[in-house]
Image (cartoon, rainbow, N blue to C red):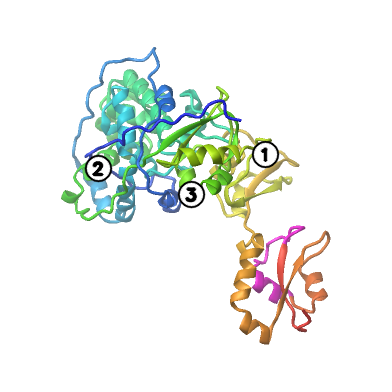
Amino acid sequence: MLKHLTIVILLALLSSCSHTNSSPHDGQTSDQLSSADSIGHFRVSEDAKEEKQAQKRPDQQVEELEDIPVEINANVNKWIDYFQNRGRVHMERYLRRSTRYESLMKKVLRDNKLPEDLFYIALIESGFSAQAFSHASAVGYWQFIRGTGKRYKLDINQLVDERRDPVLSTQAAADYFKDLYQRFDSWYLAMAAYNVGEGRVERVIKKYKTKDFWTLIKNRRALPAETANYVPKYIAAKLIAKNPDQYGFEGIDYMPPIEFDHVTLDEPVNLRLMAEKMNINYEDFKALNPKFKGEVAPLEKDQTLGLRIPPGSYEAAVIAAKESTVDKVVYIADQKEIQPYRVRKGDTFSTIARKYRTTVAYLRDINDFPRKRQLRAGQRIFVPDRTPLNVKRPSLAKKSTAKRAPVASKRQPAKYHIVKKGENLATIAKKYSSSVADIKKANNIKSRSVLKIGTKIVVPDTNKKL
């Protein structure tokens, strides 16, 4: 099965750099950004394949660009105050995360002859969450929208999203910032363009006849409020991250840098199965390989598959990979959290997002829909599966029932029923002399939940006929 399996065990990236962080990006919620808190603790090293992918393109400048200036004024002080007070909980969380990625990302920036301090852009953009979304459907550490991500050679499809990869997305950000700096000859204007787009910045420069960022933002009509705040927010976050104690952020429990070995395969694998056979936590395995959207990792364009694995697990990975190959490469969502949905007349992404308590950005992401693509009636898409956990996983419900067995055996014994075509809660309740309310309560079924054919549910039997 394996043409070749290689491992690159590189020296852990050592860094005494300070610790960074940011406030929630405009348009994102703290819940969206905090999704990265569950990432496991590893130390990061780069593998040979990623270094090859991260090499700068030959048509770009090679000279080292000037450092980013630091100007402290009322705009910056406003954001320092925000981070110290109302936004403190976010800053503390992002400071903890920052050291997980600091050495890795700064090395990519150095290799591209860029100022290391661009690292703090990722702080104000995503708070170092691979899963972060914005209101504009921007994704990942550096918050690339789909078009810009693809322009800078990031693969984005239903199985893979390299905007979520800390190495590849940082390289894309480096390439983008080199282009922006060459275009505007100003780091502040380059940052503004990173936020709002090159065209908008060029137009306001021409209209107001100045290339001074601070002069431009004095006119409230020149740039959107988010963009006018972008540079001050960046400076404030950088000042705090470099000197956390000075700004009142003592005692942060920083995460260690991640560390991994690398294996190259020549067949696609199921990552959940591979993690299980390696006897490692699946979520930690996915945290090392965040570009894969679901359980299946497909081959890349060169017909190989590079995976990061925990240090010292090479032999286990070789064996596990052989036993985890897939014949058909399809999207399998993590934890079975999605279900199919047929688009009805009048449906929009917004109405569907409200119905399934999610965001338009998430729906577009899991369905690989570009921003301008619209829905069609009759089309099948994926939506979040809001079926109660104990209904989706009867084994959990069974364990829960077993724990309560002494009480249930005296009052209301229970049995299980497999939902058949045409059945609903009322017909099932009648069959077992139970009630719809009791069945809903036993299975934690919400009022609008739809029973799926084949689902195993708990049915309280009031007649005690087991």
Mark 3 belongs to which amino acid? Ile
The first of marks 2 and 1 along the sequence is 2
Classify residue 195 by image quadrant.
top left
Task: Note whether 263 is above or below 131 in the view shown.
Answer: above
- Report crowding for label 2: few under 14, some 14 to 19, many 20 or more residues within 10 A (C-alpha): many
Q: Which disc is residue 280 wearing?
A: 3
- Check disc 2 and report the residue beneath it: 236
Query: Which amino acid, mark 1?
Result: Leu
Q: Say which of marks 1 and 3 sits in front.
A: 3
Q: Nearer the viewer, residue 390 or 79?
A: 390
Left or right, 45 with respect to 324, comes to left
Which residues, given as a range, are shown in magenta? 436-455
Q: Is residue 135 above or below residue 107?
A: below
Q: Which residue of the protein is positioned furthest toward the left in this rendering? A: 246
Point out which mark residue 375 bears.
1
Q: In 3D space, how far apart are the residues under numbered discs 2 and 1 (Cα atoms)?
A: 41 Å
Using a 10 Å C-alpha cutoff, classify the residue at mark 3 as few (fewer than 14 neighbours), some (14 to 19) or many (20 or more). Answer: some
Provide residue 18's location: percent of width, then percent of height: 23, 42
Q: What element does badge 2 sit on? A: helix
Q: Residue at x 47, y 29 (%)?
A: 6
